[in-house]
Image: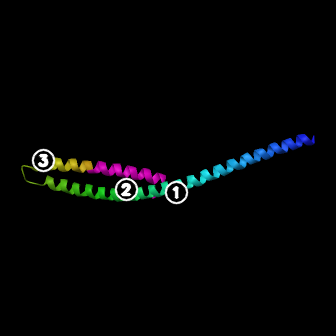
Amino acid sequence: MLASAERALGAQRESLGEQSREIAKLTERVALAEVEYARGRAKLLAAGGQLRGLAASARKTEDRLAVLLDDSRHLRSPLKKQMVTDAAAATAAAAAQRAAVEKHLKRVANMVPI
């Protein structure tokens, strides 16, 4: 009976040793993941800031183009039609670009509050 108890104790010690090694490995993996997470979060925050600046710039460009489009509609020139067409196309392109930037900004904001 004593021999059986010693074998059981030895098996439990071996199991405990394996668990300790596994805990050490997992603890190291968690530490590395935390460092990687912090680095990725910092990159997301930086990208979010840049996207905010780009979105503001895109809004300003879109607003200026809308004014230009409105002004071109009041021209009295044979080139009026072409100018209105070009201004409308540029305004639409700016609106699409702004929308795309804001979409990416929302995506980043959902990952990391900015």
Which residue occupies 21% across, 47% down? Answer: 89
Which residue position is annotated with label 2?
A: 51
Q: Amino acid at mark 1?
A: Ala
Which residue position is annotated with label 3?
A: 82
Query: Counting other residues with Cα less than 10 Å from the Cα at mark 3, is it few (<14), some (14-19), or many (20 or more)?
Result: few
Q: Amino acid at mark 3?
A: Gln
Q: Nearer the N terminus, badge 1 or badge 2? A: 1
Which residue position is annotated with label 1?
A: 38
As measured in the structure, the alpha-carbon distance from the residue carrying label 2 to the one carrying label 3 is: 33 Å
- Image quarter of the C terminus: bottom left
Determine contact: label 1, label 2, CB under 8 Å.
Answer: no
Is 93 left or right of 104, judged from the image as shown?
left
Residue range in magenta is 94-114
As measured in the structure, the alpha-carbon distance from the residue carrying label 1 to the one carrying label 2 is: 20 Å
| Secondary structure found at label 3 | helix
Q: Position of residue 27 (x, y in %)?
A: 64, 52
Q: Amino acid at mark 2?
A: Leu
| Secondary structure found at label 2 | helix
Query: Counting other residues with Cα less than 10 Å from the Cα at mark 1, is it few (<14), some (14-19), or many (20 or more)?
Result: few
Which residue occupies 79% across, 47% down? Answer: 13
